[in-house]
Amino acid sequence: MRKLKREHSWFRRGAFAAVLALGVVAIVAATGGTRVQAAETVRISLFSWPGYGFWFVIKEKNLAPNLNLDIQIIEDPLQSFGMVTAGQLDVMSSTSEFGPIAIERAMPVRLVAFANLSYGTDQIIAAPGVTSPKDVEGKKVAVMVGGLQQIFVGKWLEDGGVDPNGVEYVNVIMDDAAAAMMGGDIAAGELWEPYASQVLSGLPGSIKIADSRSAEWASTGLLADAVYMNADFIHAKRAAAVELMGALYKAVDLWKQNPAEINAIIAKGLNFDVKDVEMVLGKDGSGTDGGLYPYTFTEAARFCGSAPGEPPFGQKNGQIYAHWRLVNEWWIKFKQVASEIPAARGVECGLHRELYESGFAGTPDPLY
């Protein structure tokens, strides 16, 4: 099986990766003596993860006819954030926790949407003999330091009455985390599939002790993928930004209607086996038979507070702001940021609002 490459090397401390210069060429075609303006080029990056593959669907199905999508796979999200900051990328997919860090570093990056909710992909696996957070106190825990995985473990510890800084965090990528746990030196680790199952089958006595599929975790919206945009792109090329957001949800709708076809397009774009995409996204279009739940437009707009009603899984309207505060609080605890940063500086839900008011999902409520 091809291994899923969701290895966030940007969580490691260090300087930005070198920023690559990109050129955008405006193409003008002549038809019958009339000059036709080329489609607006939008530069998008993602790393190799099926939840981000809907950009390929937009391009394959021409769901954004006024846009030319320049899609790049960049495995180091920190490099992508640097390129967005430099104006060399317009849009990127990554996990949802980087917003406060970006704003503290004065990056012109805005969190514009929650794309997918982790729904079973992320798990905390305990070594033999560990049955509660108390059993982990003072021991080693494998995580990707500085990422959602560390917050997941930290909150699990705190909810269980253990100081989240009272363990030794071992900073590892997934390959190494699984190997370290089976080597017997780690009390618990945050892993996603297929690594979690590898440990459960290869380490007798190990157990799954927390799971993002459970109601208590799904309701927090903590573990999620997101869409980020360059702030100047959002304002200077507003029509393109709105069209792209609408196209993203058209792609999700197509997946729900025909998951086999859309999973194949995503697999081709990522150079994955289809079965690997199915393991993450599922096969039936429900969003609940795999490990990720892709938000529809209405669900994402509600999470942003840009449309009436409640998101799924017990989440609340406008919860994106509570998510920002939750992540910010944890980054202060883990010394990734120095202070509280207002969500209004980093969250941009106006694209959802424009789509809602345009009737994208039906007649809008004039009183909302």
Image (cartoon, rainbow, N blue to C red):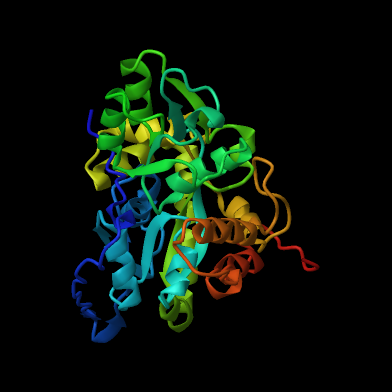
> Quadrant where the C terminus lies?
bottom right
- Residue 166: x, y in percent? 49, 43
292 displayed left or right of 186: right
Residue at left offset 21%, top offset 79%? 25
Tell me, yes or no, if residue 361 can be seen here: no
Q: Image quarter for residue 360?
A: bottom right
Residue at left offset 46%, top offset 36%? 138
- Residue 316: x, y in percent? 70, 51
Q: Is residue 300 above or below residue 132?
A: below
- Count of numbered badges drawn on the protein: 0
> Farthest residue in the right direction?
367
Residue nearer the viewer, 334 or 292: 334
Q: Is residue 315 above or below residue 264?
A: below
Residue at left offset 48%, top offset 22%? 130
Residue nearer the viewer, 140 or 43: 140
> Farthest residue in the front direction?
138
39 displayed left or right of 238: left
> Quadrant where the N terminus lies?
top left
- Residue 304: x, y in percent? 62, 60
283 displayed left or right of 303: left
Q: Is residue 221 above or below residue 337?
A: above
Tell me, yes or no, if residue 10 can be seen here: yes
Residue at left offset 62%, top offset 46%? 220
> Farthest residue in the top direction?
204
Q: Image quarter for residue 14?
A: bottom left
- Residue 67: x, y in percent? 36, 69
